Image (spheres, rainbow, N blue to C red):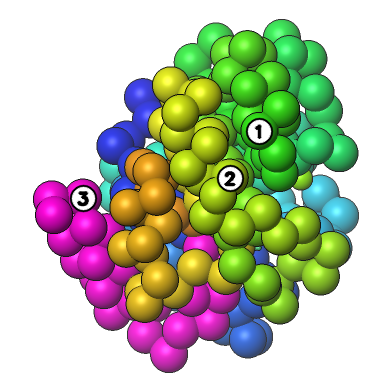
């Protein structure tokens, strides 16, 4: 699958979902018009993830949306995800690229301009930068602020997605700083109504892009 035009990128994270089922949250994101989601699981071993992941992958495929797996190459390959996402402590992007089927998308999280440039040199399909704002979701987050979005926009041609503490209320300024899209965990997974949160994000992002 090609990378869809970036706007809202929802990360499905069980730990941030307040005990709710990720299948329900994914269905809400799909109903709300989301076009790209990521599966992120920091605690469960692979075997435990697999049944849930297979269901999520099946639902995403049925809806025709892009499905990315974070960190875990075994799981990304096992469910034939559309994409794989690595951070700075995961498999290096060039090695991940060698191991992935040619059609699988690769994204990288970065926390500095050097890392963003390196990701581009490594030929990734999109570059994530963050954390833009403080966030309770990732305890060891590195705060980079909107300045890194502005700088990365100048340096990186690939699609740029900003992450960290993004809500419907601050999404527009992130887009205005140069991000193509925003990646969010708690603002959708922890929202009372994930479909409504998805719609609101998309409305704000699209308005900021057309302004
Ligand atoms: N990387 C940088 S900040 C972050 C990650 C995975 C957490 C984002 O979560 P939230 O709830 O959208 O702030
Ligand atoms: Mg990672």
Type of secondary structure dominating the magenta stretch: helix
Closest to the observer: 206 or 85?
A: 206
Task: Answer left or right for 33 relative to 181.
Answer: left
| Residues tagged 2 and 1 counted as in contact (Cβ below 8 A) | yes
**Vertical comparison of 104 with 62: above or below:** above
* The disc label shown at residue 113, or none: 1
Check disc 2 and report the residue beneath it: 148
Q: Which quarter of the rendered picture does the C terminus lie within?
A: bottom left
Helix, strand or loop at label 3? It is helix
Please provide percent x and percent y for residue 110.
Answer: 68, 39
Residue 27, image x, y percentages: 37, 67
Q: Secondary structure at mark 2?
A: helix
- Where residue 193 sits: x, y (%)? 37, 85
Q: Is residue 33 shown left or right of residue 125?
A: left
Is any part of residue 194 visible from this angle? yes
Residue at left offset 71%, top offset 27%: 114
The magenta segment: 184-211
Mark 3: few/some/many CA within 10 Å (<14, 14-19, 20+): some
Residue furthest to the left in view is 210
User: Would residue 89 be found to the left or right of residue 160 on screen?
Assistant: right
Determine the secondary structure under disc 1. Answer: helix
How far is the residue under mark 2 from the one under mark 1?
7 Å
Expressed as whole percent of the image width and height from the top left, the position of residue 123 reads 58, 13
Task: Say if 183 sits above or below 169 in the image.
Answer: above
The answer to which of marks 3 and 2 sits earlier in the sequence is: 2
Crowd band around label 2 with a 10 angstrom C-alpha radius: few (<14), some (14–19), many (20+): many
* The quarter of the picture showing ligand 1: bottom right
Q: Earlier in the sequence, mark 2 or mark 1?
A: 1
Task: Give the residue at x 81% y 70%.
Answer: 139
The residue labelled by disc 3 is: 209
């Amino acid at each position: 699958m090609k990378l869809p035009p970036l706007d809202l990128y929802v990360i499905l994270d069980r730990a941030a979902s307040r005990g709710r089922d990720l299948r329900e949250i994914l269905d809400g994101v799909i109903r709300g018009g989301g076009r790209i989601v990521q599966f992120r699981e920091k605690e469960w071993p692979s075997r435990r993830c697999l049944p849930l992941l297979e269901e999520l992958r099946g639902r995403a495929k049925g809806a025709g949306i892009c499905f990315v797996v974070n960190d875990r190459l075994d799981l990304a390959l096992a469910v034939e995800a559309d994409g794989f996402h690595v951070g700075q402590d995961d498999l290096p992007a060039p090695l991940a690229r060698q191991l992935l089927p040619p059609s699988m998308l690769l994204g990288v999280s970065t926390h500095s301009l050097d890392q963003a440039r390196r990701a581009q040199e490594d030929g990734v399909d999109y570059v994530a930068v963050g954390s833009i704002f403080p966030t309770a979701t990732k305890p060891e987050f590195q705060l980079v602020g909107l300045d890194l979005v502005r700088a990365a926009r100048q340096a990186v041609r690939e699609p740029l997605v900003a992450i960290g503490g993004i809500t419907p209320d601050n999404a527009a300024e992130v887009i205005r700083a140069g991000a193509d899209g925003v990646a969010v965990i708690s603002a959708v997974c922890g929202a009372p109504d994930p479909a409504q949160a998805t719609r609101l994000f998309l409305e704000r992002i699209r308005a900021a892009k057309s302004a």
